[in-house]
Image: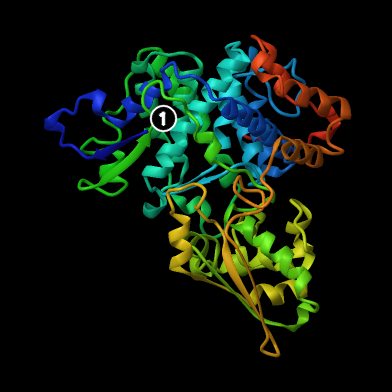
């Protein structure tokens, strides 16, 4: 790996493009690095993971709307949309829009946390859509996904967006563009322009994850993927981009992030070095923000240790800066304590999540978020007794550069009315790669079966699982088999009409 030092240059210096971050990204996207066996297997795992949560969300409002929009853009030799007959094809950018929204809706797929936040699995829908439309094979898709993960993880390690209240999809646009470029074997120059265009058009604020969180949280990565596809298309036609997009005098860094005196270190593999960043990422066992994963595990353990939850006086959670200020009481969002809040808001409220998991001793992607569940009096009482605190020791562990030591956990102290204190702590979620029971292929398959149960037929389930596990052998046109169909009368429609 090489740590590239990124800073702003005045226009008069005319920074050589080969010294620009976008060019360095394009170089590794266009190289001929060997593919790592474990990385290939993880790509298959994550495609299964994405399909699981996408199928489970097919009839949720935002997914229905995204699908209705996409259905107006059919194409004879296009891409498939989850739920719809595979013989019907759509423009790849619109298929990516529909499928990307379905993947993101439940906040239940993979994550990577470092200087910034990300859901690298968001790269997969646009890459599959483009691969289907352009008749690429399984190995082409694998290469593209491995590259996209590499770029996104590198950017998330090196450049903090949330400090400036910029949504993390600003790292997704470039990674999707790089992944598509790698999959299509485009020239370095073309990928360089596409990466810059994709970043330029995917800058948005974190208001989408603040206060009353709306359905846009599900749309945001799908929108970034769609814009990235369009950026690659323009670059392939010879169009240029705002440049240097990272280092320029009026660039993203200069005007949106740390400013003209900014200095960043972005780690990227050397040209032709094996890409393995996907192995540093981790999926979710529970449908909630990643920082809640370990805390749900803690709550389940405390459920067995506390004989009567009515005896609870207060609960203190000591955790990292991120957990406290983004999903804890440090966010100062009253909506996070409101039983009538949206699902998107509740899955970013560790107080709500912990209260429910503590009471139920388990977590369910639908039942744990119902209005009735949120309004249960006993839950609200526990919910209001919870307070989070930043503990610098946990923040330091959160930022540990060693993946084996990096921590996303907390220490919880429950104080009972008689003064007794019961505590539990956990560094990492049990399902984390370095957790107590890391997710393996069988766990991804089980998650798929649980989430798709009673939605798809057993035949459809077996067909998809057999196909995806043979991804390396899939030839041109075989990637359409990665789609999952449901019975036509299962899919809901939005009776409200839009422009399309």
Residue depicted at x 59% and y 65% = 336
- In the drawing, does residue 119 fall left or right of residue 79? left
Horizontal side of residue 159 vs 133, given as left or right: left
What is the x, y in percent for residue 483?
72, 24
Place of residue 222 in the rendered image (x, y in percent of width and height, measured from the top left): 56, 35
Left or right of 331? Residue 338 is right
Q: Quadrant of the C terminus?
A: top right
Q: Is residue 131 above or below residue 338?
A: above
Up the image or down, 8 lies above or below 162; here it is above
Q: Say which residue appears at 71% left-offset and 35% top-offset.
A: 441
Q: Does residue 229 appear anywhere in the picture?
A: yes
The single residue placed furthest to the bottom in the displayed view is 418
Graded by Cα atoms within 10 Å as few (under 14), some (14 to 19) or many (20 or more), the crowding at tag 1 reads many
Q: Residue at x 69, y 13 (%)?
A: 478
- Residue holding disc 1: 198
Give the x, y percent position of residue 268: 38, 33
Say left or right for 2 vs 409: left
């Amino acid at each position: 790996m090489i740590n590239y030092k990124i800073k702003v240059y005045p226009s008069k210096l005319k920074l050589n493009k080969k010294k620009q971050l976008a060019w360095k990204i394009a170089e590794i996207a266009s190289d001929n690095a060997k593919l790592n066996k474990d990385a290939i297997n993880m790509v298959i795992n994550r495609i299964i993971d994405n399909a699981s949560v996408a199928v489970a969300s097919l009839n949720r409002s935002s997914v229905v709307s995204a699908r209705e929009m996409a259905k107006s853009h059919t194409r004879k030799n296009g891409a498939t949309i989850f739920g719809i007959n595979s013989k019907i094809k759509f423009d790849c950018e619109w298929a990516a829009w529909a499928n990307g929204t379905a993947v993101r809706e439940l906040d239940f797929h993979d994550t990577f946390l470092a200087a910034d936040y990300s859901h690298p699995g968001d790269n997969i829908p646009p890459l599959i859509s483009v691969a289907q439309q352009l008749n690429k094979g399984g190995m082409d898709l694998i290469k593209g996904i491995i590259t996209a993960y590499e770029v996104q993880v590198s950017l998330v390690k090196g450049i903090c967006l949330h400090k400036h209240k910029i949504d993390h999809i600003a790292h997704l646009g470039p990674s999707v563009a790089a992944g598509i470029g790698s999959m299509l074997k485009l020239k370095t120059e073309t990928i360089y322009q596409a990466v810059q265009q994709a970043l330029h058009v995917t800058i948005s604020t974190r208001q989408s994850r603040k206060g009353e969180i709306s359905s846009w949280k599900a749309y945001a990565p799908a929108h970034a993927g769609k814009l990235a596809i369009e950026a690659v298309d323009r670059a392939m036609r010879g169009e240029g981009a705002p440049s240097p997009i990272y280092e320029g005098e009026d660039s993203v860094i200069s005007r949106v992030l740390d400013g003209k005196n900014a200095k960043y270190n972005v780690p990227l593999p050397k040209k032709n070095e094996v890409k393995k960043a996907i192995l540093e990422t981790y999926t979710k066992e529970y449908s909630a923000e990643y920082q809640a994963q370990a805390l749900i595990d803690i709550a389940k353990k405390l459920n067995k240790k506390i004989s009567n939850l009515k005896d609870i006086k207060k609960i203190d959670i000591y955790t990292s800066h991120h957990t406290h200020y983004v999903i804890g009481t440090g966010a100062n969002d009253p909506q996070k304590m409101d039983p009538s809040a949206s699902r998107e808001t509740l899955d970013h409220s560790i107080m709500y999540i912990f209260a429910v998991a503590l009471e139920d001793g388990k977590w369910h992607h639908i039942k744990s978020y119902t209005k009735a569940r949120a309004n249960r009096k006993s839950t609200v009482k526990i919910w209001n007794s919870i307070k989070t605190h930043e503990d610098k020791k946990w923040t330091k562990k959160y930022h540990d550069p060693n993946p084996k030591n990096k921590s996303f956990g907390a220490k919880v102290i429950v104080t009972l009315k008689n003064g007794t204190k019961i505590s539990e702590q956990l560094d990492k979620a049990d399902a984390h790669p370095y957790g107590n029971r890391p997710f393996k292929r069988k766990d991804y398959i089980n998650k798929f079966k649980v989430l798709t149960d009673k939605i798809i037929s057993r035949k459809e389930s077996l067909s998809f699982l057999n196909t995806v596990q043979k991804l390396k052998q899939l030839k041109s046109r075989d990637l359409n088999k990665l789609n999952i169909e449901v019975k036509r009368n299962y899919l809901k429609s939005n009776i409200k009409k839009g422009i399309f």
